Image (tube, rainbow, N blue to C red):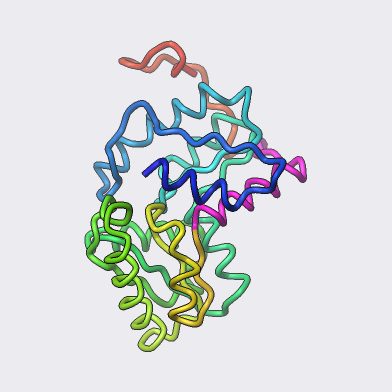
Amino acid sequence: MTSGIDLSAQAARFPQTEIVTVTPASGPESIESYYDEYLAIPGILEAIKLSDDDIDAFVIACWGDPGLEAARELTRKPVVGIAEASMYLANMVAARWGVVTTGHRVRTMIEETIHKTGFAHRCVSIRTTGLAVTETETAREATLLALEEEGRLAIAQDHAEALCLGCAGMSGLDQALEAKLGVPVIDAVAAAVKLAESLAWLGKTTSKAMTYQTPDAKRFKGYPEHMQS
């Protein structure tokens, strides 16, 4: 899956941008539940802490944006979640938009991500395909067909005017789906890459005025020295 994410990120970048795509050292193979998400976050934060000196901006490539706020506490560099980025772009090209995603159980997680980002009033459709996250990489044709089916329902029944692909594993399917559906389809990984590049190019950093201040110094039991604040 990291390889597929890298392909989409590399395709979207400016020529002068160098992208380093990594899999956290710890965490689940995919995120499809709250348990998965919470166990993924320490590995995400560790990857950021270990590479902060060498990186200009970070992208968290999971549509739930796991650990996004904590990541912003750890670094002054911009941190962009792919869910947040795709919604920002959808909001610029359509008055009403939707999200097409994976398993049925993640619907509430998707709703919470949309609400947290502040776009609940603009998102008119959440469609779940029932696909496992790993299937989006291993069964591309089936994934495209499922996305097309749910996308047509989002347009016809919910009156969505654009769609966000609600899983990093769906990256690279946006153009084929857009040709079939006739509405803008947002590749979340590509969207996050472009926003991260823009923030870095503009020289913008994460505000440390209050909310995203560096965590207070304290000991964290069971974590290695490089994870201590």
Name the residue furthest top.
225
Residue 200 shown in magenta: yes
Which residue corresponds to the image point at 37% horizontal and 63% vertical from the top-left? 111
Which residue corresponds to the image point at 77% horizontal and 45% vertical from the top-left? 202
Instruction: Indicate whether 63 appears above or below 218.
Output: below
Q: Quadrant of residue 166?
A: bottom left
Residue 151 shown in magenta: no
Nearest the camera: 6 or 163?
A: 6
User: In the rendered view, does 206 fall on the left or right side of 229?
Assistant: right
User: In the rendered view, does 139 fall on the left or right side of 5?
Assistant: left
Q: How far across and how far down the image is residue 2, in percent?
A: 40, 41
Q: How far across and how far down the image is residue 139, in percent?
A: 27, 58
Which residue corresponds to the image point at 48% horizontal and 74% vertical from the top-left? 178
Q: How far across and how far down the image is residue 128, in percent?
A: 29, 68
Name the residue furthest right.
202
* Quarter in which the N terminus is drawn: top left
Name the residue furthest bottom.
156
Which residue corresponds to the image point at 37% horizontal and 82% vertical from the top-left? 152
Instruction: Indicate whether 227 appears above or below 115.
Output: above
User: In the rendered view, does 180 fall on the left or right side of 109?
Assistant: right
Nearest the camera: 188 or 219?
A: 188
- Magenta part, dominant SS: helix
User: Total marks drawn?
Assistant: 0
Q: Which residues are magenta?
A: 188-209
Q: How far across and how far down the image is residue 44, in percent?
A: 42, 33
Q: Quadrant of residue 103?
A: bottom left
Nearest the camera: 28 or 19?
A: 19
